[in-house]
Amino acid sequence: MPRLPRKRPIDYILPFLIMICAGIIVVLAFQLYQSLNQTEDDKDIYMYLAKGNAKVLQWGSGEWEKAYNGTKILQGDSLKTQRGGRLVVELFNDHLLRLDQSSELVFSEIKKNGDAYDINLILREGKVWINNDENSETPVKFMVKTDHTVVKTVSTIYEVEQDEDEEVIRVIKGSIVADILVDEDGQKRNVESIQIGVGQEAVITNEDIQSYADRESPSVVEAISDDFRETTFYKWNMAEDKNPTDFSIKTTTDDDGFDFDDEEEEEDDSALPKPEIKVPSTLNFDTNEDSLTIRGSTSTDTKKMMVDVVSDGAKNTYELNLYVPGGTEWSFAISVDAGTMAEGPNTYEFYSISENDAESKKTKLTVNLGEVADDDEDDEDDEEEEEEEDLDLPPLVAPTVDTYNGGESNEDDTGSVTIVGSVEGAEKVIVDGYTLSAFEAGDTQWSYNARVSLGNLEEGENTYEVEAVAPDGTTKSTQFTIIYTPTEEEEEEEETPVEEEPATEDPATE
C-alpha cells in the first residue's frame, strides 16, 4: 500500500487564513455599504421650514411647488420663502443656510471636489445667512452672487442681502473678499475687490454701482449698523448659531412659538412691492432742463400712487392724479414752474397705497438740476407773459389731435411720433406736464414730439393728456393714445443697451 504524503504546516494554517480573509471581505463590504449609504442619505442637502411657508422650484420644472420639511435640494433647484416665512438648509450635516422671509435663492451648482464641495448660489432677492463650519468633515467653498457682487468663502459666518436699491454683505466671523461687478457691453465685468472684516458691512447702492462703472472707488465698508443688530433676523440667526434647533423633528405651523417680531411681520404681510422707476434710467439723474416726466411701474394691487417731493428745502406730498387704480404704469411731471424742481438736488420718493390703505416701501430718485437760464432771459420771459395777458383771445375751445406723423393712424414702429393738433383761445398748451415752448398765446395749432429717446414713448399703448389754458386760468383738456410696436431690430438694440447721456430735448420742439 502506498504511503500518504505528509502534510505540510501550511496545510493546517490555510483553512484559517481563508476564514480570516472571508471575514475581512465581509467587514469591508459592510463598511463600503455604510459609507455609500451615508453619502447618499446622511450627507446630502436638505431644507427645513423654520416658520411659515416656502416654495421649491426643482430643476427642469416650470412650476413652483410647496416645500416640506426634509425636502432634498439638488443642483439647479430654487427656494423661495413667502411673507412671514423662514427656512433652514442643512448641508452635509455641518453647514447651515438660513433664508429670511420674501427671499429667493438658487443652487446654481453643487460640485464635489475631492472630499470637499463647491456650492454656487444666486440670491435673487431677500436675505441669506451662511454658517460655514470650519470644523466640518466635509469642507464647503461657497460662492454667493447678487446682481453686482460675488462672494467666495470658506469657514466663516456672514449675511448677504439683495433688493432693488442696494446689495449688502455683513461679516459676523472671519474675513471675506467681495468682487464688484458692473454691466459693460452686455456683460458683467469685475472692476474692483473689497475686503470686509469681522464686524463690518458693505452697503452697495445703485449710486455706488454707477460710481464703480465710472471707475471711481466709493467708500462702502463700515461697522455693522446697530439697526441691523436689532432686527429679528439677526437675533434669530445668532441664537441658532449658538444652539441650533433640530428642525428635522419639528412640525411647523404659521404660529410655531418662535419669538419673531409680530409687528414687523404684519407690516410685511400688508405691504405692496416698491414701485419701479423706468425713466430716468438711473436713480441719480443730472439735467439742465427745467421740466421732466418721471415714469415707472407698480403692482396691480395699487389703489393710488404717491410721491414725497423735497425741493428747495421744502417737502410736499402729491398724489399722481393721472394714475388709474389697478394699472401698472404711472408718470409724474416735475418742473421749475410747478415748484416741484429747483436748482440743486431734488429728491422724489415714490410709493403705492393698496385698497386697505397699506403703503409700500419707497423708491427714491434724486434729480440734480443745473443752471437753466440767466436773469436776462427770465426778465424777457416775464415781459412776454405780461404781453400775453393783455391779448384779447376768443373763447377757449378744447384741444384736438389732427395728425400723427402727418397721418391719421396712431400706430407707430419707429419710436418717434410728431403729434399736431388744433386749439382756440389758449394762452398755453400743456402735454403730460410739459408746457409747449413753441406754442404762443393765440396760436391755433400745437405740436408735440413723443420719442423713445426722450423717455415719453414706450412699447405698447401710451396715453397722453393735452390741456389748454386760457388767460383767466380756465382749462379744457382731451386725451390721445399712441400704440408703439418696435421692429425686431429695435428690440434687439434694446436688449443690448449702450450707455448714453440722458436725453434733454424738449418734447415740444424738434
Image (spheres, rainbow, N blue to C red):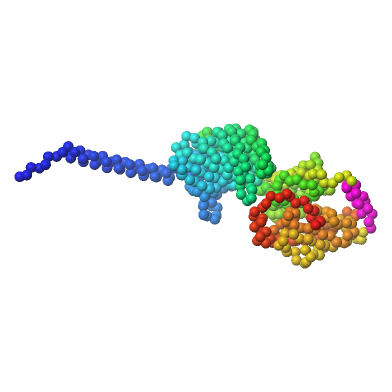
Q: Residue furthest left?
A: 1
Q: Is residue 75 above or below residue 417?
A: above
Of the pair 72 and 135, the residue shown nearer to us = 135
Name the residue located 94 percent from the left edge and 54 percent from the top edge: 390
The N terminus is located in which quarter?
A: top left
Of the pair 259 and 195, the residue shown nearer to us = 195
Magenta-span inclusion, residue 381: yes
* Coordinates of residue 141 in the picture (x, y in percent): 51, 40
Of the pair 243 and 263, the residue shown nearer to us = 243
Q: Is residue 423 left or right of residue 31?
A: right
* Coordinates of residue 474 in the picture (x, y in percent): 87, 55
The answer to whether residue 20 is visible is yes
Q: Is residue 493 above or below residue 108?
A: below
Number of marks in picture: 0
The answer to whether residue 308 is visible is no
Q: Is residue 479 above or below residue 70?
A: below
User: Please, what is the dominant secondary structure of the magenta stretch?
Assistant: helix
Name the residue located 58 percent from the left edge and 47 percent from the top edge: 104
The C terminus is located in which quarter?
A: bottom right
Q: Residue furthest bottom?
A: 408
* Coordinates of residue 315 in the picture (x, y in percent): 78, 42
Name the residue located 79 percent from the left edge and 44 percent from the top edge: 370
Magenta-span inclusion, residue 91: no
Q: Is residue 181 left or right of residue 391?
A: left
Figure quadrant of residue 157: top right
* Coordinates of residue 336 in the picture (x, y in percent): 82, 47
Name the residue located 78 percent from the left edge and 44 percent from the top edge: 369
Which contiguous range is marked in magenta?
Answer: 377-392
